[in-house]
Amino acid sequence: MLLNNDEFLLALAELFVATRENGSVTVTLKRYNYEGVKQERQKKRAKTASNEEAMQLIVDRLSLNDTEYATLVRANTEKRKLSTLVAPSSLDVFLARYHGLLMVNAESIKKKDRLKKKKAA
């Protein structure tokens, strides 16, 4: 479900509270590319084209440009999926609020039990 940034952070806080005792929340951040259809076409062409043409398509796709991209943020549990699209201009504010939310809910993370190994003398 695509939410605006404020609604996403509120729903994410609810997910953290709901999974405090058991369960997990997976959060992913990735660059949102507006040209998804164009890339799919290039992939299909690369499969059918010769090796040189395929390599040129890959180089063209990976060439650096000054375009700013939005960030797609997804959070999901076993039963619920959330997502939001963060504009480049508001990314710093969003990440600051997200960081605060993580710090508040970091206490529920279980520490790994580490067994102390005796070193051989």
Image: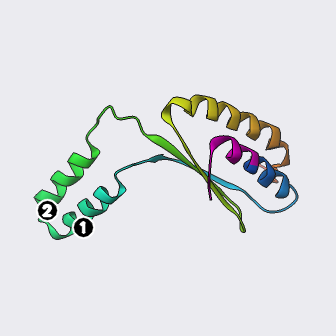
Q: What segment is highlighted magenta in the picture?
A: 1-10
Q: Which residue is mark 2?
A: 51
Nearest to the observer: residue 91 or residue 78: 91
Instruction: Determine the CA span between mark 1 and mark 2.
Output: 13 Å
- Is 93 contained in the magenta span? no
Picture coordinates of residue 48 (x, y %)? 17, 70
* Residue 120 seen from this side: no
Q: Is residue 31 left or right of residue 121?
A: left
Dividing the picture into quadrants, the one containing residue 41 is bottom left
Residue found 38% across the figure and 49% down from its top: 34
Of residues 62 and 87, the one drawn nearer to the viewer in this rendering? 87
Identity of the residue drawn at 84% across and 52% down: 17
The front one of 84 and 98 is 84
Residue 97, compared with residue 25, is above or below; it is: above
Q: Position of residue 30 (x, y in %)?
A: 50, 47
Give the side of residue 26 with respect to residue 105, left or right: left
Residue under the image location 82 percent in, 54 percent down? 113
Mark 2 Cα shell of 10 Å, populated few (<14), some (14-19), many (≥20): few
**Image spot of residue 53 (x, y percent):** 12, 58
Please tell me in which quadrant of the rendered image residue 104 appears: top right
| Amino acid bearing label 1 | Lys
Q: Which residue is mark 1?
A: 44
Q: Give the quadrant of the N terminus.
A: bottom right
Q: Is residue 2 magenta?
A: yes
Q: Please report whichever mark, 1 or 2, sits nearer to the chain's N-terminal start.
A: 1
